[in-house]
Image: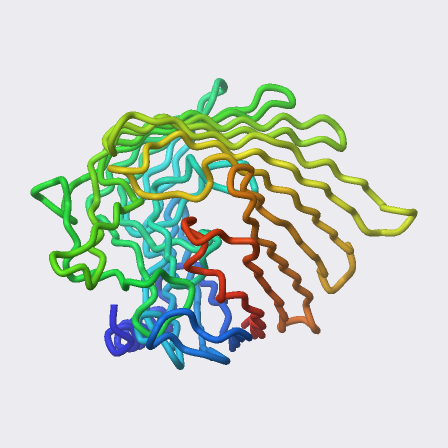
Amino acid sequence: MSIKKFSILLIFVCNITSQSVFGEFEFSGYAAYEGRWFPNSAQFPEQLHGVQNALIIEPEWIIENGDHQFSFIPFARIDSRDDDRTHADIREAYWLYIQDGWELLVGFNREFWGVTESRHLVNILNQIDQVENIDEEDYLGQAMLNFSIQKDFGRFSFYALPLFRERTFAGHDGRLRGPLIVDDDEAEYDSSAEQWHTDLAFRYSHYIGDWDIGASYFYGTGREPTLLANSDGSRLIPHYDLINQVGIDIQYTNEEWLWKFEGIVREGQGDTFAATVFGFEYTFFQFRSSDADLGILLEHLFDDRDEIDTPLTTLENDLFLGTRYTFNDIQDTSLLAGGIFDLEDESYSIRLEAERRIGDSIKVELEGQVFTNTRDDSLTSAFRDDDFIQLRLSKFF
């Protein structure tokens, strides 16, 4: 969505909601400045060097009227250096009807499935907004019809997903990309309906004592594209396959221990393959007699997809080791540091995330990532010069 269309939509929504005829109305959100600094020279021609500035806004309107709830959350980023990173999206715009024991949701929504820290294998409804960050924690809004039933023996959720969202990629000037840019305008699909194929999904979730379990099934256009070179080898064309995917996620809580597992089996992209993430988080509460908590995280990542007809991955046999330090102070200060180590080619990347609130409405976030020991024949070699430090200052309203 262009920034101009996004602005017109915002004005329209403000005019309507200001009339206050829809029941209980709540307005909130944030605006932010973000600066990302790449200290190393770019590896590929045309890529930016130095500081990449951006302005971000994400307002939020929620209206509740009896059994009805309306949510509208648009998002926009204006980037100073990469035109493909300047974009707008409707993260949420839905009507939710709630009855005793069942719910119906219609519209754009984001829904997260899964329990592990380093990779989100079972989370498949929403497309990744990759220009936001390569950590795969940001998602585009997905059009859906979602009907859920809550019973004593679990929650059953059914989804129809009529409009597929293509993944976003960095442009010519952008960093954190490969040597060839991805041409979104030439995207290819298995389905003749292309983006209008209606995907279907189901999820069952429940808890039994200390166990939280989830099981899911998805049929439709896979969110991970296979990137194919065009005829003259100058660009990459994203190809989106029709897939079947079965997923399971389990979390077991025992005092200081959190044991986590996610696993999928996917058919439709080359040979049928499986992938898993398994590990734990152990927390030292009130660490060294302070108010702070210290968590230790360890996860093993496995993926046995072939390397010919499937989207490529670097997480075939890797180990994630991290630590989370939560100060439990009035500023909500926290620190997360971790690294993913490839057990086959011995490359690794290290990531740091820290945040702290200033006053009642300002938050500062610091993020950094380092890629090191990358071999020339590995996928991560494209990022070897893309170490970065990022600062975001957000004002909440």
Q: Is residue 11 left or right of residue 353?
A: left
Horizontal and vertical percent for residue 126?
Answer: 35, 47
Quadrant for the N terminus, please.
bottom left
Q: How many marks?
A: 0
Where does residue 221 sit, x and y in percent of width and height? 22, 40
Q: Is residue 208 above or below residue 161?
A: above
The answer, for residue 149, to whether it is visible in the render is: no
Looking at the picture, tell me which residue is in the foreground, 134 or 1. Answer: 134
Furthest residue toward left = 192
Q: Nearer the viewer, residue 234 or 105?
A: 234
- Evaluate whether residue 231 shows in this view: yes
Residue, x 58% and y 60% (percent of image)? 370
Residue lying furthest right in this view?
289
For the point 56% across and 70% down, the residue is: 390
Residue drawn where x is 58% and y is 74% of the image: 393
Q: Quadrant of residue 17?
A: bottom left
